[in-house]
Amino acid sequence: MGDTIPADVRLFEAMNLTADEQSLTGESIPVDKTVDHLEDTELGIGDRTNIAYGTTTVQKGRGRGVVIATGMKTEVGKIAAVSNIEPSTAYLCCYIPQHRGKALPASPRFL
């Protein structure tokens, strides 16, 4: 209980397992994990109950699974990769003249 899941894992054993996925999905309630096969291949991250995601924490229970992604290939890694995209110069050229003389918002894209 309280352990951080180190990688994205496809579960093959789950004993009363719930995980706090708030950092990934925003869901405030811990998610019950299962080993059931999910037919729909287009499910969102929050609906894939047979996968435990890296950086989320175990709230109760235990489980075992096969690692399916590590590092930047995990769901959290994909989000991090998208958030590190440099802003386009076209956006800055349009944004800055409109706000001349005003303080710009504190945002990583302007640093």
Image (cartoon, rainbow, N blue to C red):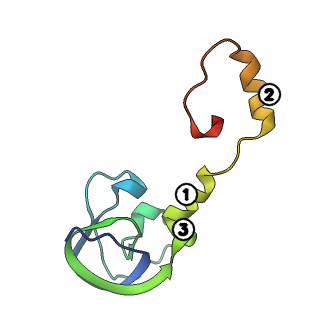
Report which residue position mark 3 lands on.
Answer: 42
Residue shown at the point (23%, 75%) measured from the top left: 17
Residue shown at the point (41%, 70%) measured from the top left: 53
How many marks the image carries: the answer is: 3
Q: Earlier in the sequence, mark 2 or mark 1?
A: 1
Q: What residue type is labelled 3?
A: Glu
Report which residue position mark 2 lands on.
Answer: 93
Count neighbours of disc 2 (C-alpha within 10 A) and say few if under 14, some if 14 to 19, many if 20 or more: few
Where residue 57 appears, as percent x and y from the top left, is 30, 66
69 is higher (above) or lower (below) than 85: below
Task: Specify the quadrant of the image occupied by residue 56.
Answer: bottom left
Image quarter (top left, top right, bottom left or bottom right) of the N terminus: bottom left
Q: Is mark 2 on a helix, strand or loop?
A: helix
Q: Nearer the viewer, residue 101 or 21?
A: 101
Q: What residue type is labelled 1?
A: Ile
Report which residue position mark 1 lands on.
Answer: 79
Q: What residue type is labelled 2?
A: Cys
Whether tag 3 and tag 1 are in contact, CB under 8 A, the answer is: no
